[in-house]
Amino acid sequence: MAPELFKGQPYSYSSDIYSLGMIIWQLTSGHRPFHDQEHGPKLILDILDGKRPEITEDTPECWANLMKGCWHSDPSQRLSLNEIDKLSEKFYNYYWYSENRVKRDYPDMWSEFNEAENKRLEMVESKKPFVKNPGYEHPNSRYYSTLLNPMLESINSTISDIYSNDNLFSNDHFDINFNQINDLEFSDGNSSVEISRKHFLDESPQEEIIEDQTDNSKRRKVVDYAKN
């Protein structure tokens, strides 16, 4: 969902453009956006603060720029339908034109796609994953319609109430006032989103992976860094 929808703004062509960018990312990566993260309040705050799926290394630059143009935090700065139509025509011609004509008419695009294909083959040969956690999908990632307001209303300023709860990152234990979300700014790192996110992360117990020397296996440990 486009960031402005989390602030209570109505759906628009611009929010559809944002969604198109996510569809394009899924086509290039082979995974659903944020597949390895819980779809809840923390992810909402991250998206409002500019978080987007990481573009894979084998993505042509022109294709990556198309996604970035669709994902802009400011709806008025996203690509228009006319701009996307012109880019789509170039991609269409690239597919149907002969190799010589593509090299002549779209030399930059030809170079970018060839460079991307070489990178893809290199990653396949080295068995380097194209995305993080490729074989994992978070059990609380959601790709179906759900009511948004209850989730937003559950995010309020009384985060301290969750510290004693075992399921710290569950959607049911966050509270931030809906009106606060409408006031969020995400133009730079000093935004209220960033401040809220940093406050939560600074005050919450953090999880780290530690080595168990007895059986050479890894286990998770929760450490309260705020108290150290």
Image (spheres, rainbow, N blue to C red):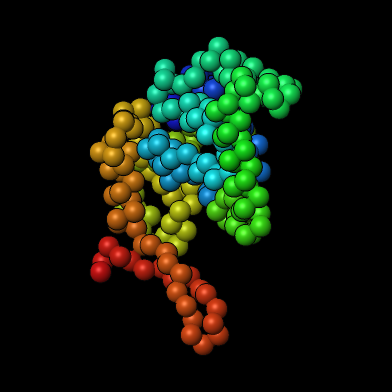
Looking at the image, which residue sits at the far top? 82
For the point 71% across and 27% down, the residue is 99
Q: Nearer the viewer, residue 36 or 97?
A: 97
Q: Is residue 48 above or below residue 202?
A: above
| Quarter-of-image position of residue 29 | top right
- Relative to 75, 94 lies left or right: right
Spot occupied by residue 15 in the image (x, y as percentages of width and height): 51, 22
Spot occupied by residue 66 in the image (x, y as percentages of width and height): 53, 27
Q: Nearer the viewer, residue 60 or 174?
A: 60
Q: Is residue 32 above or below residue 216?
A: above
Quadrant (top left/top right/bottom left/bottom right) for the C terminus:
bottom left
Q: Nearer the viewer, residue 30 or 74?
A: 30
Spot occupied by residue 122 in the image (x, y as percentages of width and height): 62, 53
- Relative to 219, 122 lies left or right: right
For the point 46% across and 43% down, the residue is 43
For the point 49% across and 81% down, the residue is 212
